[in-house]
């Protein structure tokens, strides 16, 4: 079962470019070193210092690999000095998605 961790955070305006470089580096690390995981970050166009990061792991094994390799929120450690306030984190389990193939129910 896929698990999605959503993190919302704000960076200091003067640290915007440095923060985005750190995010790119972390995304590259996840892509190359952590199979079964993907890490995506979105920026709010109306508030360009506000970000939402989504970590998706395919299953429990991928989640364990991710935690072992990076810690729970390794990007928070990298971005810590650049942040305004705390990172808000929510963990979610997949219920359904338009990306899923339709399953026929037995009657």
Image (spheres, helix red, strand yellow):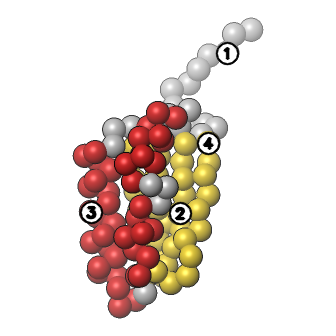
Which class describes the residues within 10 Å of circle 4: few (<14), some (14-19), or many (20+)?
Answer: few
Answer yes or no: is residue 72 visible.
yes
| Label located before the other in sequence (4 or 1) | 4
State the residue lying farthest toward the bottom. 14
Circle 3 Cα neighbour tier, 10 Å, few/some/many (<14 / 14–19 / ≥20): few
Q: Residues under labels 4 and 1: Cα distance?
A: 21 Å
Query: Residue 39 in the image: x percent, y percent?
Result: 40, 53
Q: Position of residue 63 (x, y in %)?
A: 48, 41
- Which numbered dot is residue 15? none
From mark 4 to mark 3, how far is it between C-alphas? Answer: 26 Å
Q: Secondary structure at mark 2?
A: strand
Q: Position of residue 36 (x, y in %)?
A: 39, 37
| Residue linked to disc 2 | 7
Mark 4 vs mark 1: in front: 4
According to the picture, the residue beneath numbered tag 1 turns out to be 105
Residue carrying label 3: 25
What is the secondary structure assignment of the residue under circle 1? loop
Q: Residue at x 51, y 26 (%)?
A: 101
N-terminal label among 3 and 1 = 3
Residue 20: percent from left, percent from top: 32, 73
First along the sequence among labels 3 and 2 = 2
- Residue 81 relative to residue 28: left or right: right
Name the residue located 59 percent from the left edge and 20 percent from the top edge.
Answer: 103
Labels 2 and 1: the sequence-earlier one? 2
Label 1 crowd (10 A; few <14 / some 14-19 / many >=20):
few
Q: What's the CA distance linking mark 3 and mark 2?
A: 17 Å
Rendered residue at 45%/48% (across/down): 67
Identify the residue under disc 4.
Answer: 93
Q: Is residue 46 visible?
A: no
């Amino acid at each position: 079962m896929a698990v999605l961790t959503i993190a919302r955070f704000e960076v200091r305006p003067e640290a915007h470019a440095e923060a985005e470089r750190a995010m790119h580096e972390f995304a590259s690390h996840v892509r190359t070193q952590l199979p079964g995981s993907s890490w995506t970050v979105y920026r709010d166009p109306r508030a360009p210092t506000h970000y939402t990061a989504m970590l998706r792991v395919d299953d429990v094994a991928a989640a364990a690999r991710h935690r072992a390799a990076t810690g729970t929120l390794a990007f928070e450690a990298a971005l810590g000095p650049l942040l305004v306030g705390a990172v808000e984190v929510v963990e979610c389990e997949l219920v359904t998605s338009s990306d899923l193939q339709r399953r026929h129910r037995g009657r």
